Image (cartoon, rainbow, N blue to C red):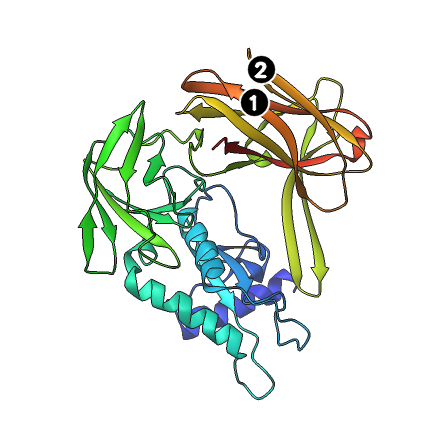
Amino acid sequence: MPKKYVEELIEVVRKNQPDALVSGRAGHGLGDYQSLGDMEVPHHNVKGLWESVDTTNDSWAYAWYDENWKTPKQILGLLVSCVGRGGTYMLNIGPRGDGSVPQRAADALRGSGEWIRRYPQVVYGAGPSPWQHALPWGDVTTRGNKLHLAVFEWPRSGELHLPGLKNKIKSAKLLTSKESSAEIAHKKVSGWSVFSLPVGAPDKLVSVIEVELEGEPDVDPCFAIDPVVDTEILAEFSEVSGAKLKRNRWMEKFGEWKHVNQVVNWQPGGAATWEVDVLVPGDYKVALNYTGKGRLVWKVAIEGGEAIQNQQNASSVFHDYRIGWINFPKPGRYKVGASCIEGDTQSAALKGIKFTPLR
């Protein structure tokens, strides 16, 4: 709408409900908060007031052909990610023409809602993660001097690794409901906090660990390679040289939006480089997530250390391609770069890198 009509609309809202907030989608910078693109959940913390707008499947209204319903765990993953990045999550429902909600959508909403009832402190009134991004096993929200670790991938090793926390830990509890918890042991190892856990996850959806700190959270947000769980780091967190970081978005079906930040326009010597912290030295399997045409040769190198390369096929769909094993000889900080060095390098679009510990 032209700006003058948006101003009139906002004036009507203010007159009738002074406490209402107007969405940024009103346009012309006149909203009270930012509304991101459809189905867009940011991977890094975003300042200010904002929301992410999503839907229970791939369609915004009811669509008889769309049965791709989000599971309760998927909904919780998106919800906790939004809170962890500093925003809120608005979830759309597409009812049938008679007003009824499809059963699978209702089941997913009830399942995620029951989890929120058990752990409201993870979501309601919670602050963003001091790590400023997700962690390999899940995500973090805050409340004063407390961290709430939402563990989506339960480590089978019996230990959960939390990098970069500088505070002293007063207590760590494994929550089983809003009121019930059990103390768990913890220790510091080379700057990492390591929590001792039962072998099985206590919650079938997402388990929660509450960590009370001495003082407000003080964290080094550097990406860290988990010694147990796969670690995926997106290209948008890399330092790019001799190439270009580009944002891309597209619609796959009516209403289903996809968003990706990718490294493209590779020049000779170009690289996407990440700084990572390693706790457990040794060999890690490396995979790159990319699209392209034909066969591409990729190189992954540790600054001042080992370099590996591999020729792999490519397709128009983002996919993980195995590059090889790479060795981190000792604990500490490393810079790891990825480069497309042969083939149709101008078609190559890099989405991220993944490290898997050799088990």
Q: Is residue 67 above or below residue 166?
A: below
Amino acid at dot 1: Ile
Position of residue 296 in the picture relative to residue 205 (left or right): right
* Residue pictured at 29% horizontal, 63% vertical: 118
Which picture quadrant has residue 273? top right
Residue picked out by circle 1: 326
Amino acid at dot 2: Glu
Query: Which SS class for mark 2?
Result: loop
Query: Which SS class for mark 1?
Result: strand
Q: Nearer the viewer, residue 255 or 168?
A: 168
Q: Nearer the viewer, residue 76 or 92?
A: 76
Q: Which mark is residue 198?
A: none
- What x and y, as percent, mark residue 19? 37, 67
Residue picked out by circle 2: 306
Q: Is residue 129 above or below residue 92?
A: above
- What x and y, as percent, mark residue 95? 56, 79
Q: Residues within 10 Å of mark 1 (few under 14, many from 20)?
A: some
The answer, for residue 224, to whether it is visible in the render is yes
Looking at marks 2 and 1 on the same chain, the residue that comes earlier in the sequence is marked by 2
Q: Is residue 186 above or below residue 9?
A: above
- What x and y, as percent, mark residue 190? 32, 22
Tell me, yes or no, whether the two marked residues, 2 and 1, touch with CB atoms within 8 Å: yes
- What x and y, as percent, mark residue 35? 53, 56
